[in-house]
Image: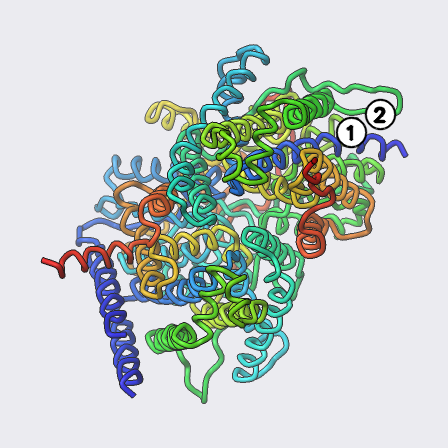
């Protein structure tokens, strides 16, 4: 039983990382329909940013974090401006931005590999590597930090979409681009913000997960796949879906490894099988989008 | 229809012209080929080995070269892809190399063997440790002087002999070399009647190793052997180990000897036992460290030493063969014995005895322990 | 009739080149021909049928492993092994296609991506059957009618594979089926309204191209006489996608141009920019998608048109 509770915190933390990546996809997909497979590479860029600012330059954690996230905001904005906006405005087929972003995935990865080399680099955690015990629940400081940050981000995002006007305009664009434009919503601004926000969230995931995993140039693709799986499970329709999907995926992964009598190599297939099952049986995910309110 | 073929013919002819123009111009040098990984997953391990080899060639050429001729090192990048490795091998063979060194991934070296076997070109890996390289393909032209997985485990076990481990855990990753090393570790452990109570895999891309380490903890082993070769995943394992409060001694394969761990696994390494092939106290090693540092400005480490020894062994064989004739080189290489290189313990020497093609002295590895985050001194030598 | 003559001449010319090349060049040439074969098939699936699938290389791998396992572990004679191998690819392709083609756009991509990764997991866990992480090696193409097919004669086999793949796909493209595929790609609803069975069209397209990839895999198994999980990983499928897009998706000639360019480019660029050709490809991809979505072949067309007008 102890193991179970202990695993609970770790699995929740992993689930939160996946949830952030899933949110990152969602922030772009909902208003624009574009699926940005390069979110994993964004996480990687932020992780290296964390390495440079926090490890090499030893800036205090909050300062470094703010700088990295600020940098990610600019990168997201620039990515949209350079590679996606020209396509959206030209009326290119829906596939085109997705392909352009796939190309950017490779570009990001190679640039980092060129700049930093192939060795993994250390990124410090927020509060050190200690361990916290709250009654029966135990976990590392970093795990609790990840959970706290993720819940805050999701709460903020939910509030943004549900209660603010700007957020509602995002929703409007998601439902019908043309109608939203006719209503005077600035499509360009919404799209830029969507990409910028997505990059910040993805970057957050990268900085949070890299103290454990280290920053290395190959870390993007597995995160991208895990994040997308979480998104499919939870459903693209609602922000909470990303969180739910991430948690389900992480729990399935880790509890299968811990408790299932399956050879360890095959346990790796669990997230893949989950993804395939969900895609085939319930592609819209577990949480359906809320119906338009009258 | 015709237009299509015109396109195709033009592009293929252009391609052929590119190929033909890449033929090397003749020089009176001895050509040695090297296949490394400059961009792929093995880059972190292949490039330092390659650097050691480049330095060795530089040193040899400064002393007059080989058989009175300068050595020309032709380097090919296989990007860590086994099929590209085979192509690279063919290119080197066509360029007239006397010997090929493979320092990339184990399966890449394996695939390159299909070429060297067919063309009877002498071929060696000075760094790969996969035990099956000399057994899976019957290639009399291929030698391996990297530290075999079986040697690693027997050295570790000899160190642990008086600790009387009866029940142990094995933790690895899902890379090809990790799995291979794991297999040989397991075989040797079972041969010594040691029970394996837990065998876990931490796959590439994991965010945590907690579930696996919980299982290890639940099995309560006397010791834990790490046989993986993926650096981030190994760091995860070490971190989980500490977080979950495990106490069983850790014994690692030679991957744990790579210096990158000191930076990404800070605070996690104290007391970790690992097997290495580098003894800083050895005379040849000291000399190598000094001259390398003087020449390049950086201090070399074990991976550079493999490449250096590789070239030196090849040069020694060619010298004994007296020519660049492939058959003569093969005979000379096969008859290498008692060659003292930079790698290995103080008394270790390379040699291919009894027709075997693995040359690393089975008694030549050392066991060291991490003291804090630094690689500590040698605590045990050999596998007797 | 004329078509057969042109094909025969092409076969002779391409094979003759094989006889003229040295060992290294033959290797590059053979692998180039195989990549062109794969690109043609992928172009049909992605460019003409509009299915974003990442499983093409997986079927290449399934074909390669199948033929080796059938020949050397099950012990079938060569002709039977080839037939069973093809049948296996068709069956697996159907099993994947029937549920997968219901998915739209990028969801299909993800499902096939997961399938591709699952294949690697199975290979790694396959123990003695698949050779696990190390793969299978140390085998040789069995004699055909008592003759050893090796060297430039094997290149002839690859040439025949390429030409038959090309013929099949070209024929399909020109037929009603090809038009149906394009209709489904452009607007499934309209296609359905015109009486096209959308689901069947997609399934057939997927199955045929995957089976062709499997056949190419069977031929590949004897090029280096080694198969291992690393060869069939994800990197190559991205490269295939890049080839088709940079060359010009939807056009057979585009697939050829893309394959030749992206395969030979690293070999040429290496001495110049070192080895960061992946960066160059990523940039190519972005540039092509942004500025010349018709690919290089579209550029060629534009240049010809402009030249003709003067």
From the top left corner, tell me how far across and down residue C46 is, in percent: 46, 60
| Classed neighbour count for the residue bearing mark 2: other residues with Cα under 10 Å, few (<14), some (14–19), many (≥20) | some
Name the one closer to the observer, B23 or B334: B23
Q: Label 2: which residue?
A: A137
Question: In the rendered view, does C265 fall on the left or right side of A145?
Answer: left
Residue at the right extreme of this rendering = A1
Question: In the rendered view, does B139 fall on the left or right side of C276?
Answer: right
From the top left corner, tell me how far across and down residue A289 is, in percent: 69, 41
Which residue is drawn at the image coordinates 47% and 27% (left, top)? Answer: A189
**Mark 1 and mark 2 residues within 8 Å of each other at the beta carbon:** yes
Q: Is residue B269 visible?
A: no
Element assignment for label 2? strand
Q: Name the disc covering residue B263, or none.
A: none
Q: Judge whether C225 appears above or below B310 on screen.
A: below
Q: Earlier in the sequence, mark 1 or mark 2?
A: 1
Which residue is drawn at the image coordinates 45% and 62% (left, top)? Answer: C42
Q: Label 1: which residue?
A: A9
Residue at the left extreme of this rendering = C310
């Amino acid at each position: 039983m102890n193991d179970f509770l202990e695993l609970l915190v770790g699995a929740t933390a992993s689930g939160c990382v996946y949830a952030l990546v899933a949110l990152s996809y969602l922030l772009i997909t909902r208003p624009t329909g574009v699926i940005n497979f390069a979110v994993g590479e964004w996480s990687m860029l932020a992780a290296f940013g964390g390495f440079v600012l926090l490890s090499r330059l030893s800036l205090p954690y909050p300062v470094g974090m703010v700088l990295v996230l600020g940098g990610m905001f600019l990168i997201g904005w620039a990515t949209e401006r350079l590679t996606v906006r020209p396509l959206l405005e030209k009326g290119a087929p829906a596939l085109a931005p997705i392909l352009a972003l796939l190309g950017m995935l490779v570009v990001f990865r190679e640039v980092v590999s060129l700049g930093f080399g192939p060795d993994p680099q250390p990124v410090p955690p927020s509060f050190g590597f200690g361990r916290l015990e709250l009654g029966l629940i135990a976990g590392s400081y970093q795990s609790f930090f990840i959970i706290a940050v993720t819940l805050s981000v999701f709460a903020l995002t939910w509030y943004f979409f549900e209660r603010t006007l700007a957020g509602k305009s995002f929703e409007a664009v998601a439902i019908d681009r043309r109608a939203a434009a006719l209503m005077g919503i600035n499509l360009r601004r919404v799209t830029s913000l969507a990409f910028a926000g997505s990059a910040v969230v993805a970057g957050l995931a990268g900085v949070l997960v890299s103290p454990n995993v280290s920053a290395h140039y190959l870390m993007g693709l597995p995160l991208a796949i895990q994040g997308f799986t979480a998104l499919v499970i939870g459903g693209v329709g609602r922000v909470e879906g990303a969180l739910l999907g991430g948690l389900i995926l992480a729990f399935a992964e880790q509890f299968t490894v811990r408790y299932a009598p399956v050879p360890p190599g095959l346990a790796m297939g669990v997230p893949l099988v989950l993804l395939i099952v969900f895609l085939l049986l319930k592609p819209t995910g577990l949480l359906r989008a809320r119906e338009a309110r009258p | 229809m015709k237009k299509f073929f015109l396109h195709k013919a033009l592009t293929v002819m252009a391609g052929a012209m590119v190929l033909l123009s890449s033929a090397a111009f003749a020089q009176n040098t001895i050509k040695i080929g090297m296949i490394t990984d400059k961009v792929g997953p093995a880059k972190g391990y292949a490039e330092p080995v390659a650097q050691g080899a480049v330095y060795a060639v530089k040193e040899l050429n400064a002393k007059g070269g080989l058989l009175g001729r300068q050595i020309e090192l032709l380097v090919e990048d296989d990007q860590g892809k086994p099929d590209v490795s085979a192509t690279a091998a063919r290119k080197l063979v066509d360029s007239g190399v006397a010997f090929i060194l493979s320092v990339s991934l184990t399966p890449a070296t394996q695939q390159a063997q299909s070429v060297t076997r067919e063309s009877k070109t002498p071929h060696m890996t000075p760094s790969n440790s996969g035990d099956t390289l000399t057994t899976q393909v019957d290639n009399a032209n291929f030698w391996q002087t990297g530290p075999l997985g079986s040697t690693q485990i027997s050295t570790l076990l000899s160190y642990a002999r008086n600790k009387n481990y009866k029940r142990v855990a094995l933790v690895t990753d899902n890379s090809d070399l990790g799995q291979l090393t794991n297999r040989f570790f397991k075989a040797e452990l079972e041969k010594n009647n040691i029970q394996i109570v837990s065998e876990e895999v931490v796959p590439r891309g994991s965010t945590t190793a907690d579930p696996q380490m919980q299982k290890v903890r639940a099995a309560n082993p006397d010791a834990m052997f790490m046989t993986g070769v993926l650096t981030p995943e190994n760091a995860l394992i070490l971190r989980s180990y500490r977080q979950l409060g495990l106490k069983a001694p850790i014994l690692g394969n030679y991957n744990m000897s790579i210096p990158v761990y000191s930076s990404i696994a800070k605070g996690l390494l104290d007391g970790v036992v690992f097997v290495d092939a580098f003894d800083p106290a050895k005379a040849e090693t000291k000399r190598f460290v000094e001259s390398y540092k003087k020449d390049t400005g950086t201090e070399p480490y074990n991976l550079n030493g493999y490449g250096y020894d590789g070239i030196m062994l090849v040069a020694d064989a060619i010298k004994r063969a007296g020519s660049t004739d492939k058959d003569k080189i093969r005979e000379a290489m096969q008859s290498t014995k008692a060659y003292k290189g930079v790698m290995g313990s103080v008394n270790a020497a390379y040699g291919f005895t009894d027709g075997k093609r693995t040359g690393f002295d089975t008694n030549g590895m050392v066991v060291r322990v991490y003291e804090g985050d630094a690689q500590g001194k040698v605590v045990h030598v050999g596998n007797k | 009739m004329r078509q057969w003559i042109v094909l025969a001449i092409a076969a002779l010319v391409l094979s003759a080149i094989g006889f003229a090349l040295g060992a290294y060049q033959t290797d590059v040439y053979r692998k180039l021909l195989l990549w062109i074969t794969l690109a043609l098939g992928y172009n049909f699936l992605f460019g003409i049928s509009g299915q974003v699938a990442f499983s093409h290389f997986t079927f290449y791998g399934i074909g390669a492993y199948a033929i080796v396992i059938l020949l050397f572990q099950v012990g079938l004679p060569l002709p039977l092994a080839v037939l069973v191998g093809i049948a296996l690819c068709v069956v697996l392709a159907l099993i994947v296609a029937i549920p997968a083609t219901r998915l739209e756009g990028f969801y299909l991509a993800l499902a096939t991506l997961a399938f591709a990764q699952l294949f690697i997991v199975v290979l790694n866990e396959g123990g003695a059957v698949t050779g696990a992480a190390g793969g299978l090696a140390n085998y040789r193409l069995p004699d055909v009618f008592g003759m050893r097919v090796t060297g430039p004669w094997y290149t002839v086999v690859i040439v025949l594979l390429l030409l038959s793949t090309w013929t099949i796909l070209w024929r399909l493209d020109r037929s009603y089926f090809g038009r149906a595929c394009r209709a489904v790609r452009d607007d499934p609803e309209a296609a359905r309204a015109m009486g096209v069975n959308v689901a069947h069209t997609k399934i057939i397209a997927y199955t045929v191209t995957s089976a062709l990839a499997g056949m190419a895999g069977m031929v590949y198994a004897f090029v280096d006489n080694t198969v291992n999980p690393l060869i069939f990983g994800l990197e190559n499928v991205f490269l295939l996608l890049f080839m088709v897009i940079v060359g010009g998706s939807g056009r057979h000639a585009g697939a050829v141009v893309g394959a030749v360019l992206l395969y030979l480019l690293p070999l040429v660029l290496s001495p110049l920019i070192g080895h960061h050709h992946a960066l160059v490809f990523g940039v190519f991809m972005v540039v092509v998608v942004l500025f010349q979505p018709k690919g290089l072949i579209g550029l060629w067309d534009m240049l010809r048109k402009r030249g003709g007008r003067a």
